[in-house]
Amino acid sequence: ALTGIAIIILVIGNTRPVPYAIGVPCGSASFISGITSVWIAMPAMIALATPPSMLDTLGPRAFMLLRAVILVSFLSCSLSVAAWYRWNVVVGICDEVLGATLLWCVLILVFMRGGWATSVTSTLLAATLVLIVAERFLEQFQPW
């Protein structure tokens, strides 16, 4: 549903990508970035759907960090969508900083909670780091 909403917003809105922004060709890569930006808000939506009985088990620090994750998630989502429309260096840096902040906040929250989520998150973090490193070497083979 989120992807469908994003496609409608991006296609119906006056969204004509700049042919080249700071030497980076737009087109399908920009469209994919614009569509996937709405998924950044997913941690906040999951956190908002958490039953109160589960929230009661959080300590004060974890609860405060959960609220920070919700705030940063919606801010990062909004800025990422805005960056798709009007990208510049400042917006790009802010988008990366908010995205990294969200990632670190979620990781800290998971490690504070402990349990099975910590081992799953550690595994997914390792896989993400491998993919980031691999992408650097495979960049020349991307279709866009």
Image (cartoon, rainbow, N blue to C red):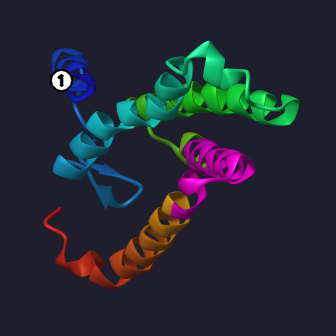
Magenta span has 12? no
Residue shown at 75% from the left, 31% from the top: 58
Q: Residue furthest left?
A: 143
In the depicted view, which residue is nearer to us: 123 or 40?
A: 123
* 95 versus 51 height, above or below: below
Determine whether, in the image, residue 61 is placed left or right of residue 94. Answer: right
Report whether residue 50 is seen: yes
Query: Where is residue 135 shown, x and y percent of the image?
Result: 34, 75
Out of 100 and 104, give the one closest to the viewer.
104
100 falls in the magenta region? yes
**x%, y% of residue 143?**
13, 66
Question: Outermost residue, bottom direction?
Answer: 137
Q: Main secondary structure of the magenta part?
A: helix
In the figure, is residue 85 to the left or right of 50? left
Residue plotted at (48% across, 27% down): 46
Q: Please give the residue where the numbered disc 1 appears in the rendered image.
A: 4
Q: Quadrant of the C terminus?
A: bottom left
Q: Position of residue 37 (x, y in %)?
A: 38, 36
Q: Quadrant of the N terminus?
A: top left
Image quadrant where residue 140 sits = bottom left
Residue 62 occupies which quadrant of the picture?
Answer: top right
Residue 82 vs residue 99: left or right?
A: left
Judged from the image, the secondary structure of the residue bearing numbered disc 1 is: helix
Left or right placement of residue 56 versus residue 24 in this view: right
Q: Residues within 10 Å of mark 1 (few under 14, many from 20)?
A: few
Q: Amino acid at mark 1?
A: Gly
- Magenta stretch, residue numbers: 94-119
Q: Nearer the viewer, residue 53 or 27?
A: 53
Residue 78 seen in render: no
Above or below: residue 8 compared with residue 77:
above
